[in-house]
Amino acid sequence: MKPKPELPASGSTDVSRPLAHVFTAAWLLTFVAFSAAAWLPPLGGRDLPGEPLGIFFAAASELTAAEGPIDANRRLESMMDELENGLENTSALRAATLPTLQWLLTGWCGVGNEQVYVGYRGWLFYRPGVDYMTGPPLLDRPEADPRPALLDFHQQLQRRGIELLILPVPSKAMVRPERLAPLYDGRDDDAPPSHKTRSHPARLHNPSFSELQSTLESAGTRVFDPGETLSRYEEQSGENAYLRTDSHWTPGGIDAVAHELATRIRGLDLPFEGPTQSWRRYSGEHRARGDLVRMLFEPPGTLELFPWWKKLYPKESVRLERLRGWAVDQQAEILLLGDSFTNVFSVSDASLPWGTGAGLAEQLSFHLERGVDQIAINNESATGVRQRLALAGASRLAGKKLVVYQIAVREFAVGDWRRVELP
Amino acid sequence: MVFSSHLFCFYFLPLALLFYYATPARWRNLTLTILSYLFYGWAHPAFVFLMLFSTAVDYLCGLTIARHADGGSERARRAALTVSMVTNLSLLGFFKYFNFGIDSANALAAALGWGGLDVALRVTLPLGISFYTFQSMSYTIDVYRGRSAALRDPVDFACYVAMFPQLVAGPILRFSEVAEQLRERRHGFDRAARGAAFFSLGMAKKILLANPCGKVADLCWDAGSLHILDAWYGAVAYAFQIYFDFSGYSDMAIGLALFFGFALPKNFDSPYRARSITEFWRRWHMSLSRWLRDYLYIPLGGNQRGPTRTYVNLFAVMLIGGLWHGAAWTFVVWGSFHGLLLMAERARGKERAYGAVPPALRLAWTFLLVVISWVFFRAPDLATALRYLGDMIGIGSPQGAAGLVGEIIHRPYYLGTFAVAAVVVWTAPQTWDFSRRLTWPKAVYCLAVLFMALVMMETQGYNPFIYFIF
């Protein structure tokens, strides 16, 4: 059979000789220039790209110690991955261009990045929190269903005579969606909540949440969804329940939830044996820039070199109500498990620069007039925090009457929920 | 390693060009082969051996077939061809369809109330296996048919299979297209200039158009429910994304190949300007269409055995083409959908009634059908595809948060990029035509978009191409 004509080939072009030379040279120089720019003296004290290359070659020399070809392959894959990430992260070019470009995209075009959605009037939103709400029913994926792990945890606690109360903390957009999308309920957003006359839109949740809650409550687990409390706090106080540029709630939001939580705990009529305690609170101002700004603004550590970012997202000021003389009480009858929503305003580190002494455990102690034990690990409320509890040994649960399990609600959709055997 | 990555653009490419041109001409195929294996092995080093194995088998089979040509043992020739095809199809079948087979069998067993297969093994799909196995098979088939002479030099053959510009996502090369070029090829500034234009425009398509359209598509597909207009917005955004992503990759591949002296064939011909599905498949992924036509459709009889057999052949080819893209029922539906459309167009023939429809309407109708088919292509499973289609025709029930998704995707940046993408799709010249004659303004334009794309690339995370997963 006669072969069909071949597809047209790309080899021929009509181009003048000088243009061909200049264009090709300019094209090659572009790549060389970009490559060289990646090696410019580091900005902000960052490492040179030579660092990851050095690590790569050092690791290569250790390949001979691999336990067989599969292990060697795995090590090689890991080395290559680290090298590629290292070269990108240490690139001075990236350090120079990314903040400026992201500033343009964020400030002029309202576009975030893989982790952050840009709202209006300076509001930022953590993407997984929004995706939890807008995404498909989380229970449609049986392999990621959080219920077996939670129900098992409840049963293990019950065998020890301990009650469980789950506190799913909503994401920012669930409480005030119009800050992400002002046309959502047809009104401009920037007026304080108390100046608005509106009825709340139906609280936004993942479509599976009510089924999840119903399953847990049917099994005897208590669930306190603080969304209404946070909305009511905003309406009545005129203050924000969430930080503008951070994924977490404000001290006022925490206090409102802690107050309501304490009321509910008292309503459980648990046989607490220990004496009540009271603490005095003292106020103090604290200023910081939220974690969402840092997520937008990569590479980290170069914020000081790009002052226009500070104007776009200035530091926020919060009023902390710190408890004088409070400390985590491992002998307390109430244990609070949680994540960064528990740690914020309680512990301070690079990811939570919001001061100490005024977190959820502290405010709960204040309103309950009882000490509170606490285990909280950022981003680990699904399984990690229960694993830490298990590692702490049986003595940590001795004498406990109640476990309050604070979970960032997005973890129901994205968390790795596994059974953990308690000692 | 992907073309649109920091590592490739600023480390691998400059070094590859340096090593290649520093190598004496007679060793350049070896250098290119080594560079290609390094490129391929970057993601999964172990799969280099798989490709080496496939290459070795086809090389030896090609020699065997050639040795027994002209009066030799026809049995040996057939056996060698069979070994080549069985080896390649077995590799493809195992790595691509093992998980799908187990999952489908278990789903069927569960539906029937039986126990499922307890198989813990999950197979990782090697990058580009669908491409290089097809390419390799075409070599042995062409040698068997006498269309090409077998390659004696193993390095040359390894270079043909592994050539990194087209290794992981095509164009799928016919051996005859590069046979001469493996022996002797021209390097020149005119080729390099055209290569630079191709690469620049391909990179711009990927970074500046495909990725933002992909953000919109991802937001829509990740949403639990959508309003009707947003569902269409997301579907068309995906149509733009896959076109610019894949054609952008092809442009970059063609451009890179030119730098190494290889002239590759055209792979896209403005497919969304097609006025029928038949025409669409002459414009979309042309190297695959050609492969399926020459190695599947025509051997099955093509259109030479009557209308019924023609329809069956068309449907079978598209069904297999769908499965080639992915091991999932959504790809089966996608391929079948196109098969049915091709059958319908064949049956309709050149009716005057359809011919009288204005071209713009025919184009719109074709695009509409293609967009609907992409819903199955994009969806992770059939349930999601059907749910999405339901949103597109307004029978879905948008949840409260659907309005939020709409607000996010209607940001000016996304709408603006979408509009630019639409203009480029339907009015801009193709890279192929644009670069056929280069002028100073065109060169400046290419450099400008390359610069913008390289800078934007630094803001984006991992940037894989859609067709890398096939």
Image: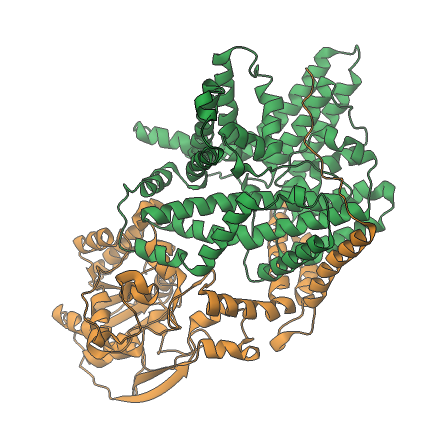
Chain the render paints orange = A
Nearer to us in this view, A319 or B86: A319
Can you tell which quarter of the image residue B459 is in?
A: bottom right
Q: Is residue B308 above or below residue B433?
A: above
Residue A198 in view here: yes
* Figure quadrant of residue B332: top left
**In the image, is residue A299 above or below residue A148?**
below
**Along the line of sight, which residue is nearer the eye, B20 or B30?**
B20
The quadrant of the rendering that contains the C terminus of chain B is top right
Q: Position of residue A407 (x, y in %)?
A: 31, 63
The colour scheme used here is: by chain
The residue at the point 64 percent across, 34 percent down is B172
Please tell me how many numbered marks the rendered image carries: 0
Q: Is residue A219 left or right of B37 when viewed as pictured?
A: left
Which quadrant of the view contains residue B207?
Answer: bottom right
Can you see residue A371? no
Q: Position of residue B163 (x, y in %)?
A: 71, 40
Most foreground residue, B262 or A43 = B262
Q: Tell whether B371 sits left or right of A266.
A: right
Q: Position of residue B124 (x, y in %)?
A: 54, 41
Q: Position of residue A34 (x, y in %)?
A: 69, 63
Q: In the picture shown, does residue B136 fall above or below A132?
A: above
Chain B colour as displayed: green
B21 relative to B59 in the view: left or right: right
Quick check: A305 left or right of B403? right
